[in-house]
Image: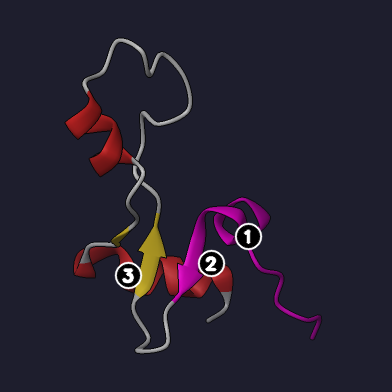
C-alpha cells in the first residue's frame, strides 16, 4: 500500500500546536487594509485555533 500523502494546501494554512490543537490565521488580512480600522487589522493579524468540530478533519489532512 502506498504512503499517505498530506494535503499540501492544508499544510500551508494550518500548524499543529504543542498541546495538539490546530492553529490557523484569520482571513481578510492581505489587502485593502487602509479601509479597515486599526483595531480590526490588529485582530486580523492574530492567529487563532481551529474549531473543535473541524479539528479532526484537518489533522487527517496534515497527517498530524
Spatial CA span between label 2 and label 3: 10 Å
Residue 63's x, y, as percent?
57, 78
Secondary structure of the residue carrying tag 2 is helix
Q: Which residue is pictured at 21% across the width and 21% down the height?
A: 37
How are the colours assigned in the image? secondary structure
Q: Which residues are magenta?
A: 1-16
Q: In the figure, 20 relative to 31: above or below?
A: below
Circle 2: is it few (<14), some (14-19), or many (20+) Cα within 10 Å?
some
Q: Quick check: 53 left or right of 9?
A: left
Spatial CA span between label 3 and label 1: 14 Å
Whether the magenta-drawn stretch holds residue 43 is answered as no
Q: Quadrant of residue 5?
A: bottom right
Instruction: State the residue position of label 2.
Output: 61
Secondary structure of the residue carrying tag 1 is loop
Q: Which residue is pictured at 66% across the width and 68% down the height?
A: 6
Instruction: State the residue position of label 3.
Output: 55
Residue 7 numbered mark, or none:
1
Residue 41's x, y, as percent?
29, 32
Residue 49's x, y, as percent?
28, 64
Amino acid at each position: 500500500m502506498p504512503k499517505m500523502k498530506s494535503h499540501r494546501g492544508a499544510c500551508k494554512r494550518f500548524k499543529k500546536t504543542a498541546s495538539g490543537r490546530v492553529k490557523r490565521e484569520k482571513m481578510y488580512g492581505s489587502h485593502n487594509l487602509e479601509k479597515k480600522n486599526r483595531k480590526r487589522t490588529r485582530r486580523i493579524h492574530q492567529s487563532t485555533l481551529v474549531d473543535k468540530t473541524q479539528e479532526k478533519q484537518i489533522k487527517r489532512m496534515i497527517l498530524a
